[in-house]
Image: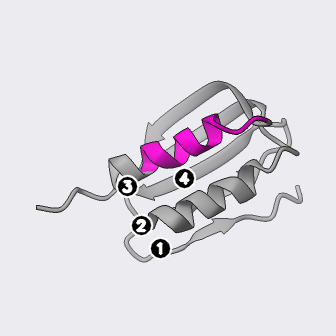
Amino acid sequence: MSEPVLRRRYRLFGAVQGVGLRWRLRHAAETLGLAGWVRNEPDGSVTLELQGTEAGIDRALQTLEQSRWIRIERLEQSSVPPAPEERRFSVLDDRW
């Protein structure tokens, strides 16, 4: 039996912009077969959605936590409905 597909939205606060977080996450998501997106926010936080298995999502977040430059001081999490049509991970434009 395969694991269910989940989708979670995260808001990350701390040293999360200008430290390669979006590109590191994109690489992890592509490696782990996750879909979703990530974008910088005007207040210095980062918002992202990850879709895939719970194990894959957890592993992608661990990749961020293991970075020597990224410092997540606070994380807000919520579940959102999966988007079956979304099959890739994107870094969204952060021009406000």
- Sequence-first tag of 4 and 1: 4
On the image, the x and y values in percent for residue 57 come to 44, 49
The answer to if 60 sits in the magenta stretch is: yes
Residue annotated with mark 3: 81
Reading the image, the residue beneath label 2 is 83
In this rendering, the label closer to the viewer, 3 or 4: 4
At label 2, which amino acid type do we have? Answer: Ala
Image position of 76 with respect to 82: above or below: above
Q: Position of residue 9 (x, y in %)?
A: 52, 45
Name above or below for residue 85 compared with residue 29. below
Q: Mark 3 or mark 1, which has the lower sequence index?
A: 3
Does label 3 or label 4 sit earlier along the sequence? 4
Check disc 4 and report the residue beneath it: 49
> Cα distance, mark 3 to mark 4?
11 Å
Q: Residue at x 50, y 34 (%)?
A: 77
Residue tagged by mark 1? 86
At label 3, the amino acid type is Pro
Q: Measure how far apart labels 4 and 1 are at the Cα level.
A: 11 Å
N-term-proximal mark, 4 vs 2: 4
For residue 22, what is the image quadrant? Answer: bottom right
The range drawn in magenta is: 57-68
Q: Secondary structure at mark 4?
A: strand
Q: For this view, does 53 lie left or right of residue 80?
A: left
Q: Position of residue 94 (x, y in %)?
A: 83, 58
Image check: 76 left or right of 20?
A: left
